[in-house]
Image (tube, helix red, strand yellow):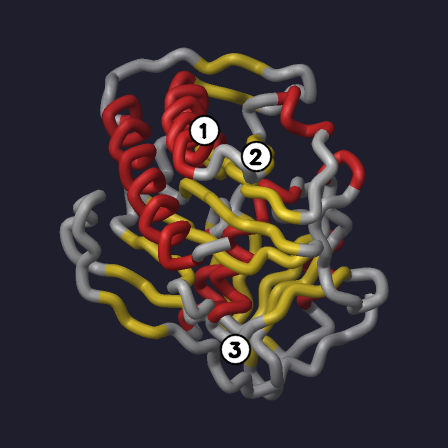
Amino acid sequence: MEFETLIPVMRKLAIEAGQEIMRIYEDEDFEVKVKSDESPVTVADEAADALISAGLKAAFPDIALVTEEQAASHGISAKTFLIVDPLDGTKEFINRRGDFTVNIALVEDGVPTRGVVYAPAKNRMFYTLADGQTVEETGDFDPAMPGPVTNLSVSTPDNGGLMVVASKSHRDQATDDYIAKYAVKDMTSAGSSLKFCLVATGEADLYPRLGRTMEWDTAAGHAVLAGAGGAVVRFDDLSPLTYGKDGYANPFFIAYAPGVALKES
């Protein structure tokens, strides 16, 4: 894989999808449907998916593509694949809370090695460069011309007072009970894959997820966090979270900045 070619394409498609999402977001009304798994889907999900899928297939026809909105893609078996959540945080989108993202990632041998997370309503964009370093871009988000970037690095945690981020829409008692095992200085909530990005920027030290997620929800954020020096492990045994699993369902997991003294489940 030529990362120098991949990264600009992923970035461009994420921005273009974000523009389409925002066009629909700013409408007074949009249709919300329910998928077979009872999760919501909107015309914005479908429009962003069509745009990203067409762009990736045109640029990388020999690389397998897995995308949330195309069930036929969920049965592939490949060591290297692109994985997309065209609108992560659909509930945030529907409720007009802004914490939704466009997620595109490359997985190689079970590891998300490159990724982009774009939050168009928040004007924040995070991605890995060709060398794997994670940056945050600022500016106008021109699809054809990258703006200024800042290299990201995770925090040096203080286990006597951690910064914790948790899900905005999927918070439960089990999550609160686990967080209570730590000395917490402050806690915030965020939607979608932004939680990984807050750990990547050093705005948080720890993000535990004791709830259902799929690989397309997490791969891009995982890549962004890893490129900033962070890690993601399974909740049950603290082994690395891997990708390409049967059905693409994730176990519970913990994303964190190394230095956090992880507690057993």
Q: Sort mark 2 into few (<14), some (14-19) or many (20+) by Cα contacts within 10 Å.
A: many
**Closest to the observer, 179 or 134:** 134
- What residue is rendered at 45% in x and 29% in y? 53
The amino acid type found where label 2 is placed reads: Leu
Q: Please indicate, yes or no, whether residue 94 appears anywhere in the rendered image.
A: no
Q: Which residue is mark 3?
A: 185
Q: Please indicate, yes or no, whether residue 67 appears anywhere in the rendered image.
A: yes
User: Disc 1 vs disc 2: Cβ atoms closer than 8 Å?
Assistant: yes
The amino acid type found where label 1 is placed reads: Ser
Looking at the image, is 147 positioned above or below residue 263? above
Say which label, 1 or 2, has the lower sequence index: 1
**How far from the left and from the top, in percent, is residue 25?**
30, 26
Q: Which residue is mark 1?
A: 53
User: Disc 2 vs disc 3: Cβ atoms closer than 8 Å?
Assistant: no
Say which label, 1 or 3, has the lower sequence index: 1
How far apart are labels 2 and 3 at the CA level? Answer: 41 Å
The amino acid type found where label 3 is placed reads: Lys
Of marks 2 and 3, the one in the foreground: 2
**Rendered-image quadrant of the C terminus:** bottom right
**Closest to the observer, 225 or 264:** 225
